[in-house]
Image: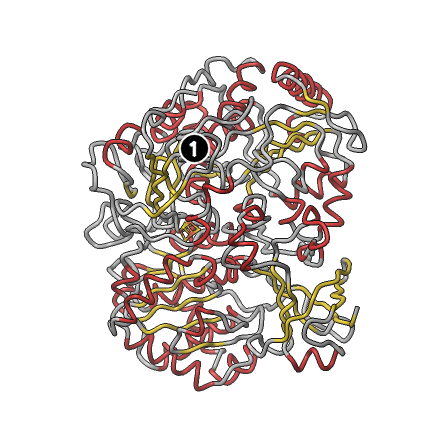
């Protein structure tokens, strides 16, 4: 593969781990076959040279266990045989055409990833939604950010975080709710700490059932019971009404629905909210006082909010607070979701969920479908109006025998989905499971029939977008191993072989990107002024970046008075919507048989299912094994001791894990990291096996943050 950086020892790219999207500067290995080295890119405006252990060690992860040739087996109890790409494409074409003839396009589904570059997302969506007539393209952003997508769209009229990282330097009050920012978005957390060390604020409030490194640094830690975020926000709203925290002018001009919201908030007096959340009333009042005093209040959240049966409602509740108090669309203020995956943002813009089309469009809107069909050069009516199957619906469709082909790409759902035993049984019944993957030996490979070796980040050119809408061209700086190919090229080749020659006639990733950004013109996420060339010449840029924008001229914040949206929200009325959703609590609350709540999460050094980070010695040393965090009171009740083995049992199964006593977790709640899947041998600890699949009815995001469990000595 030609790479314009192959002659140079240095390339620049966005970090391929979390959605902070730090800039990395890569150096080629000193010796042939060695690891390239990574360090923070001081020129990247989002991170200014900062980097955490994951980004700093990414060079060590690129060589291990790589897939180099397509693999095939007719049955999953057989060994794989290496096959040619020609045979792999023939198999795919034959099986797709047979499925279209027998069951129709709804029997096809793709489950992609926030690890995709925008070009990968775009080609896959065009193939499935445009060419083949199935909207069943979903991505692992469903497990991560789909409540933020749905919440923003519901409240503000469109997806799209309105804030930027500079707001961390400008806020008087930062509320971290449902995010262990210190471990999951460490570079942003360090930015906050640096400011606080200088005595320059901001006040920091952390809402989390566990004490974490984030809460250690906070002025106030609200250790709420799992599943009570929405009740907390209602109680805060009640106090805003009492204490004059409502910006009457902003509410009157820029919002609708205040009367209903006021009625809801009035019902959540502090005593009620504090009792439901299990916190002191005084702490809730303190937060309300600080919110009312703050000239600029910023809320950051992540999966603790999103992975909930009321994830969309909670995101709307965060937006409610900012809208009602006028804390949005100005420096240092706003509701700011932090993305988990490096390009979850780009995926949302490209239409990488089952209900979406490129440019923050939706499949259910006839105008949106027509615009995209014209752009894609497919016949009117090619895109079906019904949202496709979200990932859990794909699992249920397999259980009913309705899916004949499930194509997983750049993700490892056999670790990351809830209720894993049910997932394994469903997938086993699917006639053809295809896996596009860079690494060998994942848990999902164990259930696949056809494995396609994918070129990964560092081996292909393409674009990623981080949480602050910053677009970075990730340069290819090494050759893919063996016959590995970029995902976009695999989908495009298949599209041509299925007869869509014109539609997939791309020579380079830059051509794919150019076609995508043209579709964003006039939309909130307008990136039509961007190109690979501009990003290569001028570095990362923020959108909105309409055609004709000068480099560096993207918009830092959305919904400002002076910005291109002119504080007009993209709703029919131009006003943001306030929502009065009553709190419901956990979908599976604890009871006599399962008296504790298990919550799962991430550790600083490891990335998701450890496909990469398991091979980094420094990380493995820092996090050698999974540990169950248990409050001493709960441990005594269950007869457990520090370092002993516990059986953790939910309605879906049981596992054994070593106990770590900790007074830092709320009594009644236990914590497990989600990283160690079945492929980790003796260390395997499939936390998500215990979790349930019930989720938010709007965003379809499973409630991975709370399941009822019982403990016993093993
Ligand atoms: Fe990469 Fe996130 Fe660490 Fe930045 S904070 S280096 S994006 S993992």
Quarter of the view holding residue 89: top right
Q: Nearer the viewer, residue 83 or 58?
A: 58
Q: Is residue 147 above or below residue 4?
A: below
Q: Is residue 309 left or right of residue 371?
A: right
Q: Is residue 429 left or right of residue 526?
A: right
Residue at 58% x, 68% y: name it.
227
In the rendering, at what x and y percent does residue 105 appear?
64, 27
Do we see residue 563 in this rendering?
A: yes
Count of numbered tags: 1
In the rendering, at what x and y percent does residue 110 appear?
60, 34
- SS for dot 1: loop
Residue at 31% x, 55% y: name it.
165
Quarter of the view holding residue 246: bottom left
Q: Is residue 136 left or right of residue 502?
A: right
Which residue has dot 1 on it? 31
Do we see residue 136 in this rendering?
A: no
């Amino acid at each position: 593969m030609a790479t314009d950086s192959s002659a140079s020892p240095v390339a620049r790219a966005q970090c391929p781990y979390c959605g902070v999207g730090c800039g990395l500067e890569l150096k080629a290995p000193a010796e042939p076959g060695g690891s390239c080295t990574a360090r923070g890119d001081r020129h990247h405006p989002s991170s200014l040279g900062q980097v955490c252990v994951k980004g700093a060690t990414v060079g060590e992860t690129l060589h291990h266990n790589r897939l180099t040739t397509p693999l095939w087996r007719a049955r999953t109890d057989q060994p794989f045989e290496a096959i040619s790409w020609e045979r792999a494409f023939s198999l795919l074409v034959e099986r797709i055409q047979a499925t279209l003839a027998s069951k129709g396009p709804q029997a096809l589904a793709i489950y992609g990833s926030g690890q995709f570059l925008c070009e990968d997302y775009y080609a896959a969506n065009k193939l499935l939604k445009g060419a083949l007539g199935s909207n069943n393209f979903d991505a692992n952003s469903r497990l991560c950010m789909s409540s933020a997508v749905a919440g923003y769209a519901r409240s503000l009229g469109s997806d799209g975080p309105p804030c930027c990282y500079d707001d961390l330097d400008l806020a008087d009050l930062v509320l971290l709710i449902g995010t262990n920012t210190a471990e999951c978005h460490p570079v942003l957390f360090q930015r906050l700490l640096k400011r606080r060390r200088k005595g320059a604020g901001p006040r920091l409030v952390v809402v989390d059932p566990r004490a974490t490194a984030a809460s250690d640094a906070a002025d106030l830690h609200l250790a709420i019971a799992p599943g009570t975020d929405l009740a907390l926000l209602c109680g805060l709203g009640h106090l805003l009404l009492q204490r004059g925290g409502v910006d009457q002018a902003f509410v009157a001009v820029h919002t609708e629905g205040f009367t209903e919201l006021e009625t809801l908030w009035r019902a959540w007096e502090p005593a009620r909210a504090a009792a439901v959340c299990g916190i002191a009333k005084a702490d809730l009042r303190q937060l309300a006082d600080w919110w009312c005093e703050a000239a600029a209040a910023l809320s950051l959240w992540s999966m603790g909010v999103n992975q909930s049966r009321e994830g969309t409602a909670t995101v709307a509740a965060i937006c409610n607070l900012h809208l009602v108090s006028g804390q949005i669309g100005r420096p240092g203020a706003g509701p700011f979701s932090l993305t988990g995956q490096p390009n979850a943002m780009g995926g949302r813009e490209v239409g990488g969920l089952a209900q979406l089309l490129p440019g923050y469009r939706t499949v259910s809107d006839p105008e949106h479908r027509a615009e995209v069909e014209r752009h894609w050069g497919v016949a009117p009516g090619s895109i079906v109006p019904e949202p496709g199957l979200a990932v859990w619906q794909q699992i249920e469709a397999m259980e009913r025998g309705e899916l004949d082909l499930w194509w997983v790409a750049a993700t490892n759902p056999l670790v990351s989905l809830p209720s894993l035993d049910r997932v394994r049984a469903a997938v086993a019944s699917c006639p053809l499971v295809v896996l596009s993957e860079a690494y060998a030996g994942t848990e999902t490979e164990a259930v696949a029939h056809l494995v396609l070796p994918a070129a990964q980040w560092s081996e292909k050119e393409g674009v990623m977008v981080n949480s602050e809408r910053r677009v970075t061209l990730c340069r290819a700086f090494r050759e893919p191993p063996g016959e590995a190919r970029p995902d976009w090229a695999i989908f495009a080749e298949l599209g041509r072989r299925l007869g869509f020659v014109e539609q997939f006639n791309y020579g380079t990733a830059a051509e794919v990107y150019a076609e995508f950004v043209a579709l964003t013109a006039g939309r909130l996420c307008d990136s039509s002024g961007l190109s690979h060339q501009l990003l290569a010449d001028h570095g990362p840029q923020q959108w909105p970046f309409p055609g004709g924008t000068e480099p560096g001229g993207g918009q830092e914040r959305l919904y400002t008075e002076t910005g291109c949206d002119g504080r007009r929200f993209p709703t029919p009325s131009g006003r943001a919507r306030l929502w009065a959703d009553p709190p419901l609590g956990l979908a599976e609350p604890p009871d006599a048989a399962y008296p504790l709540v298990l919550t799962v999460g991430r550790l600083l050094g490891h990335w998701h299912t450890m496909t990469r980070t398991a091979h980094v010695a420094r990380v493995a040393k820092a996090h050698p094994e999974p540990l169950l965090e248990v409050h001493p009171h709960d441990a005594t009740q269950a007869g457990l001791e520090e370092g002993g083995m516990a059986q953790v049992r939910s309605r879906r199964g049981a596992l054994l894990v070593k106990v770590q006593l900790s007074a830092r977790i709320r009594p009644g709640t236990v914590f497990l990291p989600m990283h160690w899947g079945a492929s980790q041998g003796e260390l395997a600890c499939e936390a998500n096996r215990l979790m349930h699949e019930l989720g938010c009815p709007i965003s379809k995001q499973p409630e991975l943050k709370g399941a009822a469990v019982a403990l016993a000595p093993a």
